[in-house]
Amino acid sequence: QTRELGGFLCGRRLYETMLAWEADPSLRDNELGAAFAEVWCAISKVVFSRTLDSVQGNARLAEASVAEEAAAALDATDKDVGIGGAGLAAAAMAVGLVDELRMFRKPVVVGGGTPFLPPVTEHVRLELVETRTFGSRVIYERYERAHDESD
């Protein structure tokens, strides 16, 4: 799926988590890890942060709103652009930028933290178009916005 992306917008925490794929050679010690690292490193990334002064690799700090940065990223490619990180995804959903939702869930009860989906001001109908289970604990779901007479 990552190969299908022409760009990626992410929040600071996700950027810092994923930076390991660019900086930690031990993650490339098997064929699958090496293949993912190669794809991830090649993708242009825009990082939204109020605290970082600089970023590494094929990334730059956002200089505009999520809507403006998403438009610029889409203009620069003929592929889809991913958006990751709970806060940034919520902001993108709030301004209507998300037409597809892809989630990997590893269910665990934590009792707090950042909600997976943001509060919404209007009803958004989604249609499940793909699901997969990896092992016994990770579930992938892909949803698209549902289009019917009321949309």
Image: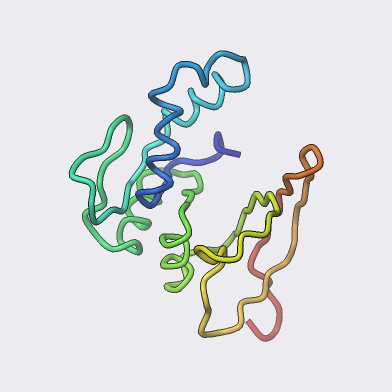
Q: Residue furthest left?
A: 53
Work out whether 84 lies above or below 1.
Answer: below
Side (left or right) of 83 relative to 151: left
When asked about the image quadrant of residue 63, the answer is bottom left
Quadrant for the N terminus, please: top right
Side (left or right) of 108 relative to 52: right
- Counting the numbered discs, the total is 0
Side (left or right) of 25 relative to 54: right
Residue drawn at x 32%, y 56% is: 69
Q: Position of residue 17 (x, y in %)?
A: 44, 39
Residue sitting nearer the eye, 74 or 12: 12
Q: Position of residue 119 (x, y in %)?
A: 52, 77
Quadrant for the C terminus, please: bottom right
Residue drawn at x 42%, y 28% is: 41
Residue drawn at x 26%, y 52% is: 62
Q: Position of residue 86 (x, y in %)?
A: 48, 59
When asked about the image quadrant of residue 115, the answer is bottom right
Work out whether 43 lies above or below 13.
Answer: above
Here the colouring is rainbow
